[in-house]
Amino acid sequence: MKVSADQYLRKPEWLRVKLTKAQDYGHVKGVLEASYLHTICESGACPNKAECWSAGTATFMILGDICTRNCRFCNVKTGRPLPPDPNEPLRVAEAVKSMGVKHCVITSVDRDDLTDGGASVWAETIRNVRTIAPETTIEILIPDFKGNVADIQTVIDEKPDVVGHNLETVRRLTREVRVFADYDTSLDVLAYMAISSNITTKSGIMLGLGETENEIYETMDDLIGVNCKVLTIGQYLQPTRNHLPVKNYVHPDDFDRYGIIARDKGFQFVESAPLVRSSYHAERTIRKV
Ligand code: SF4
């Protein structure tokens, strides 16, 4: 069942997020502020921030908070970024340690301005977390590095436990939604990681951008075809009026159905619900795969 966004100005009931008092997530907020670190939870205006932060977890965003791309779904600032901060990898590791998380998730802005796309900073960050918080498992959500396998190899050489790269949407809508990204390049990135390492690969898509049901299944098949093991499916929400509008709100029952179909197609672990984001309940992934 699909509900046209034009019919309802307000979000459907199932997307209303229960408010959490700020002090409930004071510890995470305090650690992040003291460390001068960015999170995709804040930069991406994630609707799950209260839930995740009060559970003591957050997704770090490295390489600054300005992205060189301007995907039309994403709330992260775009423009000319500052040079990488040489102390950021250490601060991420120390924040992971003081948050005491069993499983940490790290992502980054796109850094097409850097010759290695930021791969060396990624590697250093993973190394620092391994050294300072050796008991913590590491999940990373990486950009496409323009498909440059040397840069991808630099990152996966550090052996994170899970590597994600999001397709974000179906093939037909990729240009409109991700602008500078290419669907096949993203599949190639996932294929390369699955072939060249035994690290679990993960991807995510958003629904509600105008994709058809068949296109969703084709996307699942494409991901299975590159040996992707974990899939997240969530509802796209328009961060501001300058971003792509929501075409439709997908009912939770349909998310459940897509989850069942994805598991039948061969994904080892699937999270499919309106508020699912790639890092939502990420610790479950590591327990399952
Ligand atoms: S789902 Fe991910 S990005 Fe959103 S608040 Fe939770 S950890 Fe942060």
Image: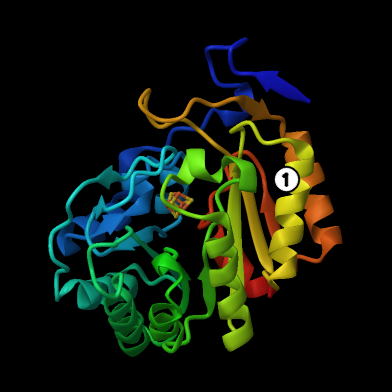
- Structural crowding at the residue carrying mark 1, measured as other residues with C-alpha within 10 Å and reported as few (<14), some (14–19) or many (≥20): many
Residue 234 is situated, as x and y percent measured from the top left of the image, at 61, 43
Quadrant location of the C terminus in the rendered image? bottom right
Residue 35 is situated, as x and y percent measured from the top left of the image, at 18, 64
Q: Is residue 187 left or right of residue 92?
A: right
Type of colouring: rainbow
Q: Is residue 91 above or below residue 11?
A: below
User: What secondary structure is found at the residue carrying circle 1?
Assistant: helix
Residue 174 is situated, as x and y percent measured from the top left of the image, at 54, 45
Q: In the rendered image, is residue 243 in sight?
A: yes
Residue of label 1: 216
Q: Is residue 26 left or right of residue 222?
A: left
Q: Is residue 52 left or right of residue 173?
A: left
Residue kind at label 1, given as amino acid type: Ile
Q: What residue do we see at 17% from left, 52% from top?
A: 80
Q: Is residue 216 above or below residue 28?
A: above
Residue 188 is situated, as x and y percent measured from the top left of the image, at 57, 70
Q: What residue do we see at 56% from left, 58% from top?
A: 281
State the residue in front, 148 or 259.
148
In the picture, residue 229 is in which quadrant? Answer: bottom right
Q: In the rendered image, is residue 142 in sight?
A: no
Q: Is mark 1 within 8 Å of ligand 1?
A: no
